[in-house]
Amino acid sequence: LLGIAGPPKSGKSGMVLDSLTDQEKENGAEIHHIDFDAGGESTKAAHHSGSTNIVVLNPWVMNDKPSRVPYDFPATYQMTIPYLKTVCFDGADHWLNICETTMKVDDLQLGVDGIATAGKATTTQIGRFNWNIRKNRYNSALTALQELCRRGIHCYLITHLKSAYDGQGNEIVGADTPNWLKDTEGWLQQMAVVELEEERNERGELTGVTEASAILTQNRTSLKSYGRVKL
């Protein structure tokens, strides 16, 4: 179970979709991609168009009744769980938001939708122990992925990075952290971080060339470090 965190459009989804070998494709191996943010669909279209070995699944459920929000979060939660026989869970940050909104709407009944339950007024009504509801919902996905790993299936959990700020609200450069539930890394067997490096010329101006590299920061199955790998 490998967690991948990195900036947007840095190759997180691409490195997973590129993982199938030609021999595996010939043998009928498939990657099933739960695509919360459309990164899997666009990556497949650009680099694996026509491939029958990559199946992209859209777990979002749209509201079919008049609503202030386009998505039905409780229905999306239920739609996602049966899909977890898959390999790539792309959007742990979206999943965390789905679990939190479902907790507020369904479990605590603090409002009728995501808008009604957003903001400080609603959050202050949530008791300290009620946050375990969000945690349990979130961990249901990790439990399913972990059990798939026990059966020899390679699973990937992808998220973006979130910025860190000091006491005055200033962004701390280089202190970004994965945007998933804070205990997530304890579930992982491996952890990789994707970094972007923008090329500059001799005058210090950006050239428009950007290189993405993956760094394996945690590996429970080996003491070896593979260093920085260019994507």
Image: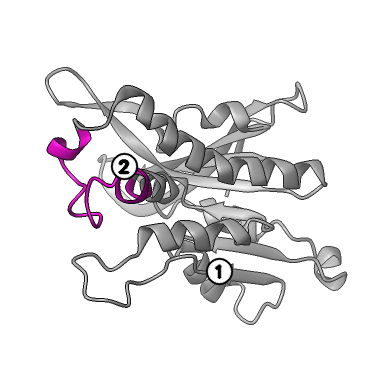
Structural crowding at the residue carrying mark 1, measured as other residues with C-alpha within 10 Å and reported as few (<14), some (14–19) or many (≥20): some
Q: Amino acid at mark 1?
A: Leu
Above/below status of 167 relative to 76? above
Which residue is outermost to the bottom? 50
Q: Amino acid at mark 2?
A: Leu
Q: Which residues are magenta?
A: 101-123
Specify the quadrant that holds the N terminus. top right
Give the image location of residue 19, x and y in percent: 70, 56
Disc on the earlier residue, 2 or 1: 1
Give the image location of residue 175, x and y in percent: 35, 25
Residue that numbered label 1 is attached to: 57
Which residue is outermost to the top? 167
Which residue is depicted at the point 37% across and 58% down? 73
Camera sees residue 180: no
Which residue is depicted at the point 66% across and 60% down? 18
Which residue is depicted at the point 50% across and 36% down? 136
Q: Is residue 38 left or right of residue 173?
A: right
Q: Secondary structure at mark 1?
A: strand
Residue 48 position by quadrant: bottom right
Give the image location of residue 28, x and y in percent: 83, 71
Residue that numbered label 2 is attached to: 108
C-alpha gap between disc 2 and disc 1: 29 Å
Total of numbered circles in the picture?
2
Above/below status of 95 relative to 167? below
Of the pair 14 and 188, the residue shown nearer to us: 188
Above/below status of 211 relative to 19? above
